Image (cartoon, rainbow, N blue to C red):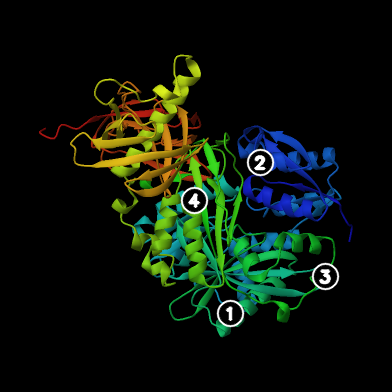
Amino acid sequence: MKRFNSLLIANRGEIACRVIRTAKRLGYHTIAVYSDADAGAPHVQLADDTVRIGPGPVGESYLLAGNILEAAATSGAEAIHPGYGFLSENAQFAEAVESAGLIFIGPTREAIDVMGNKAESKRRMIEASVPCVPGYEGHDQSDEVLLAEGNKIDLPLMVKAAAGGGGRGMRLVHDYADLANAIKLARAEAEGAFGSGELILEKAIIQPRHVEIQVFADTMGNTIHLGERDCSVQRRHQKVIEEAPCPIMTSELREQMGQSAIDAAKSVNYRGAGTVEFLLDTSGAFYFLEMNTRLQVEHPVTELITGLDLVALQLQVAQGEPLGMTQQDVSLNGAAIEVRLYTEDPSQDFLPASGPVDLWRPATGVGVRIDAGICSGQAISPFYDPMVAKVIGYGPDRETARLRLIEALKQTVLFGTPNNKDFLIECLEKQNFIDGAATTAFIDEEFAEDDLAVAIPSFEDAAVAAVIELALEYQRNKASSLLVNDSLRNWTSASAMVSRKQYVFGEVIRDISVSPVANSSNIYSVYDAGAEYSAEIELHSLGANTAELIVNGAAQRATFMSPKPGQLHCSVAGRGAMFRDMIILDGAIDEAAGGGRVVAPMHGLLLEVLVKPGDQVTRGQNLAVLEAMKMHYEIVAEIDGTVEEVTAVAGNQVAADDVLIEITQQDKEA
């Protein structure tokens, strides 16, 4: 097999950074590719060489195989690592890479072809005697056949895209009457995400665990597994928390599942890293779900409990070398738990969010690993998946790993764009998760809509923000005036100076007054408008983004960042919020769109507009379909009424908060 010394990473974000670090450690020359949206991204800064491959949209950059191959040619790359997502499971791309005389870090085209299609892979697994879920995986994809076959499957059933993964092109059906629409939506989403509308139908296994086996194979016929990962905590079939080992795994079950995974890999003459995913029901029966023919997002938990570098193993196998180990050499030690940090808004049904990264400060510490692909000052683009980092806790046992992970999340700061950090902490603190009893129904069972509402900062947190904001104002005034003197700070010959801050969080107003104590330069008395709450706060030190304070006698550390006067990101003990001082901002409180003014919830491509002026609509009715961050979203009416104006045009790109449709509310007395 041809050997290589230079490696192009055909990906972006944290996985590109992850691959580059190992490759550079092993002495490879690394080449990053980037779109215009990623010109200043960390993976670009980390690589030895870089090549631009196009504009921001993935269809004009990262998904264009020709652009990637041209970048490899111009940079002198001898091998290509696809990461995950994008072209990583594209059989044509793998073949094109090898046809160009380059090494593809992954399996053969044939293996990707079979395992990249849920229908074909399921047919192959049935032949290999790997347990499979009952359903339909036939070649006839007509709506009539799918409807007929779906009606033969016990409810609930799952409509799934045969190509791709990540929860896209999937719909759960509880009523046969909804099957036709589920097929339509799943097919459209699958075509948009994967370029293929082929579907399979399966009986839905209710409340299973999602357990996957990491396999590795070299080019000499040696195939082993590296234990399992439990990936049961999901939302929209997208993994949120992954851990190794599975909390309920037995040695016997691990041996059975591991052997089935090896059989699956051998059935397609697999090489390199792969993951065979199973559904594990309450009886202990398991069923083949799919095989991911690439490195998984959650591979760090396997690395931590095995002590292996899976990227290094990928490169070793791609060089034609043997694995250098047998199944007996694999040992699992300790426990590791990983959470995916997404820029999304849990209070808005986990709507993906784009925007600035005003401050990124990952935690450090014993048993903590963070794989990230962002930096302060960067922008989160609407063109890509909203996962920006993975935070992992490791320890000698599961509970130590869990506690370390919670503390790491509290210490991690991401200001500027809504994210799911607080939600992740809540998940890890749920008793069901602590007990190791979480299934794929975990989020639906543990979180009601009210549980996902944005938390209102406490008076004490708002008081801390007010003191920090006053200190920053003083610094700005001092920098702009020669008349300001430290010895005169907070000085007054009359009564104590009082500064007022008014922070608004939805319908809650934190009306706060701050005054110095005895003309002190760093001790403040803080109280609310109703004098119901009060605090004494000493500002011990104020750094660039960190403040040390004593709040009612207790030491506190706050991390903050002020993008402009009147706005302060502030996190105290892991509780973060944006504090907007409505007095400084002239009281201009942003009003939510709501009501009859229908706006785009995010940047994206408007796929369908389903109403026209004059139409009568009811609350909850689907008005339009938006594609953003590789998902399809239905935009629905919030009121009953008449459509007065439609400015939305199918096929157009829209920005967040663009007005799409105007509805006049129906007169309730009419």
Label drawn at residue 28: none
Precedes in sequence: disc 4 or disc 3: 3
Q: Quadrant of residue 228?
A: bottom right
Percent of width and height locating residue 251 = 57, 83
Q: Secondary structure at mark 2?
A: helix
Please name which of the two marks, 2 or 4, marks the residue nearer to the observer: 4
Q: Residue at x 83, y 39 (%)?
A: 75
Q: Earlier in the sequence, mark 2 or mark 4?
A: 2
Q: Position of residue 652 (x, y in %)?
A: 50, 29
Residue depth check, mark 1 versus mark 2: number of the one nearer the observer: 2
Left or right placement of residue 668 versus residue 374 in this view: left
Query: What amino acid type is highlighted by mark number 3?
Result: Pro
First reached walking from the N terminus: tag 1 or tag 4: 1
- Identify the image quadrant of residue 220: bottom right
The answer to which of marks 1 and 3 sits earlier in the sequence is 1
Splitting the image into 4 quarters, where does residue 260 fall? bottom right
**Which residue corresponds to mark 2?**
42
Q: Secondary structure at mark 3?
A: loop
Residue at image coords 58%, 79%: 254
Q: Residue tagged by mark 4?
A: 411
The amino acid on which the numbered mark 2 sits, given as a three-letter code, is: Pro
Residue at (45% x, 50% y) in the render? 421
Query: In the image, is residue 70 above or below residue 265?
Result: above
